[in-house]
């Protein structure tokens, strides 16, 4: 199985790149060949402290193969929470940051694992996705959107998603909010992983009868920012997308 | 749609708190059996509101200026009411407020542990505003002052979320009927709508708290009914925030509380994803 991988992430307008609270991880970049491939995106909540760091920990843990199933995710959290706390709580912080740190950090997690079919028939492989929160996976096949997960309508995006927290007390119901989906992969399929603002635009465009996957710029071996940033700027200028951090991972399935 | 402007550092929102500092604030909160003075209740509400807003704007790199915030006192004088390094200042970027409390008190606090229990913890509670109770209640005058202040701000930030003015009082103005002054304040508008006037009534009547009523007939006295009449209707965002806090809010509800806190109402100001599992 061969998959071309392109990933790009841009921060909110008016913010510095270092303030981007989205994260992504994959085992490798560009062309992937092999039996399995894992990619994850995670979106740190703006209203929490060190949430970008929490998002990076979650994405990397998924890609390391330790959180593929909901029970494994729940088992991984205490260790990740300890790492986040050891990174943050030893710092000298002013009163407001100490207060904010007590609330913990929050992030979405969307992980996708592609696996080669043991008996290649019509499909070359399968995908399995796991998500908490409102980062989305879309599958496009032969010019049609065949899967939108976990949200299927633009109107379904709210401003209060349930997220994975660094605080055990806030995670007591995380098991109820983990969703899982799977499907097959055929040559030419596109898998698109997006954080919420871009995903909401994508679904709204599709609901209007558009083909938003064709509107997304391709960058191949070029610097992704140079192609993607003007595209996002254009969406923001025409006010069809919320001003949020935006991350897109595009997987193009080869033969 | 009104009240939908993005709140960001380049397009901040404005919050102005008007605090009754008149002699009547020396009376006990909730009637003669009350153990705390109204002036102390007001100081607590004000300091908690400021703290809540600063913490919401806190990030690892410091405090982001999503808000410009001021406190006007009205009693013997109508004037900015910060203590400490911000004394005399009008509308101040929230980062300066976070860095400039007059002092930090150590307090014990109970917090929900997320599993249905409570944990007690020591916290540093910042104080910007001290209790004060002296002189008359020039509410008309302070509303006029507020109109000038937020009017000037709105002209500089025409696309911003409209200013929110929070008036905390026992509702007994001494300089006439504030109806027209409040109306003038609520008519200051920008591209995203008109100024929102919220009233917090701290009463001497030992009555149950009432939050976001939709009819004045429920209110216990003329002072409460007056402040209800001055209050803006809740915006859809405020209604959602109040309902998320567990209040049964009907259409037509006003941004008014009687003997109750208003911090929950400020949560509707959307400055980015607020997780559902963070209360």
Image (cartoon, coloured by chain):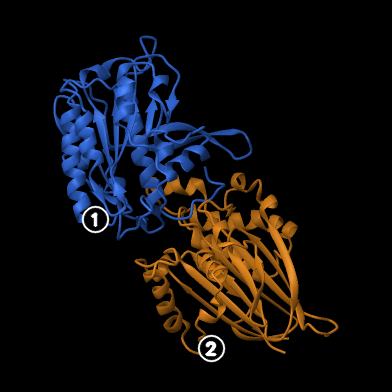
**Residue that label 2 marks:** A220
Q: In which quarter of the image is residue A85?
A: bottom right
Q: Where is residue B111 in the image (x, y as percent from the top left)?
A: 52, 35
Q: Where is residue B159 in the image (x, y as percent from the top left)?
A: 28, 57
What residue appears at the point 48 percent right and 34 percent down from the top-left corner?
B250
Q: Is residue B32 left or right of B277 when viewed as pictured? A: left
Q: Position of residue A197 (x, y in %)?
A: 50, 65
Q: Is B271 drawn above or below residue A136 in the view shown?
A: above
**Residue that label 1 marks:** B157
Q: Position of residue A46 (x, y in %)?
A: 46, 57
From this viewpoint, is residue B80 visible? no
What residue appears at the point 70 percent right and 55 percent down from the top-left corner?
A74
From this viewpoint, is residue A71 visible? yes
Tag 1, which chain? Answer: B
* Mark 1, other Cα within 10 Å: few <14 / some 14–19 / many ≥20: some
Measure the C-alpha gap from mark 2 to mark 1: 42 Å
Q: Which chain is blue?
A: B
Tag 2, which chain? Answer: A
Frontmost residue, B39 versus B251: B251
- Furthest residue to the front? A209
Q: Determine whether the residue tagged by mark 2 lies in a helix, strand or loop.
A: loop
Chain A: colour as depicted: orange
Label for residue B56? none
């Amino acid at each position: 199985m061969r998959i071309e991988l392109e990933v790009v992430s841009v921060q909110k307008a008016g913010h510095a790149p270092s303030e981007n609270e989205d994260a992504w991880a994959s085992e490798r970049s560009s062309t992937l060949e092999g039996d399995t491939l894992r990619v994850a995106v995670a979106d740190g909540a703006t209203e929490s402290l060190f949430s970008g760091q929490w998002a990076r920990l979650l994405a990397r843990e998924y890609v390391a193969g330790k959180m593929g199933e909901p029970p494994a995710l729940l088992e991984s959290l205490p260790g990740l929470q300890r790492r986040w706390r050891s990174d943050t709580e030893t710092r000298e912080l002013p009163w407001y940051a100490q207060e904010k740190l007590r609330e913990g950090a929050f992030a979405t997690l969307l992980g996708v694992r592609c696996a080669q079919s043991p008996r290649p028939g019509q499909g070359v492989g399968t995908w399995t996705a796991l998500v908490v929160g409102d980062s989305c996976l879309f599958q496009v096949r032969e010019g049609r959107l065949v899967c939108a997960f976990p949200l299927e309508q633009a109107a379904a995006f709210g401003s209060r998603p349930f997220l994975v927290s660094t605080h055990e007390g806030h995670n007591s119901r995380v098991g109820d909010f983990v969703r899982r989906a799977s499907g097959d992969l055929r040559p030419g399929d596109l898998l698109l992983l997006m954080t919420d603002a871009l995903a909401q635009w994508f679904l709204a465009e599709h609901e209007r009868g558009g083909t938003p996957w064709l509107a997304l710029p391709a960058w191949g071996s070029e610097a992704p920012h140079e192609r993607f940033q003007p595209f996002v700027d254009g969406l923001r200028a025409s006010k069809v997308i919320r001003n949020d951090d935006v991350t897109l991972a595009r997987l193009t399935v080869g033969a | 749609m009104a009240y939908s402007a993005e709140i960001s550092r380049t397009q901040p929102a404005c919050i102005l708190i008007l605090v009754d500092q008149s002699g009547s604030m020396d009376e006990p909160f909730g009637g003669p059996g009350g153990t705390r003075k109204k002036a102390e209740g007001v100081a607590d509400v004000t300091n908690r509101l400021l703290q809540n807003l600063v913490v919401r704007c806190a990030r690892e790199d410091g405090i982001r200026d999503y808000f410009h915030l001021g406190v006007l006192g009205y009693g013997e004088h109508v004037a900015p009411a910060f203590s400490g390094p911000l004394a005399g200042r009008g509308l101040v970027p929230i980062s300066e407020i976070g860095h400039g409390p007059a002092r930090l008190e150590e307090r014990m606090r109970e917090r929900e542990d997320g599993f249905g229990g409570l944990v007690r913890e020591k916290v540093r509670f910042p104080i910007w505003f001290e209790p004060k109770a002296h002189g008359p209640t020039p509410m008309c005058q302070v509303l006029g002052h507020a109109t000038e202040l937020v009017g000037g701000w709105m002209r500089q930030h025409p696309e911003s979320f409209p200013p929110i003015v929070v008036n905390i009082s026992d509702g007994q103005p001494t300089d006439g009927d504030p109806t027209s002054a409040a109306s003038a304040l609520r008519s200051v508008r920008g591209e995203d709508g008109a100024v929102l006037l919220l009233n917090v009534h701290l009463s001497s009547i030992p009555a149950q708290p009432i939050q976001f009523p939709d009819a004045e007939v429920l209110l216990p006295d003329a002072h409460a009914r007056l402040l209800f009449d001055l209050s803006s209707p809740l915006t859809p965002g405020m209604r959602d925030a109040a309902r998320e806090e567990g209040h049964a809010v009907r259409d037509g509800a006003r941004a008014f509380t009687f003997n109750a806190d208003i911090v929950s109402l400020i949560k509707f100001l959307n400055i980015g994803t607020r997780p559902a599992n963070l209360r």
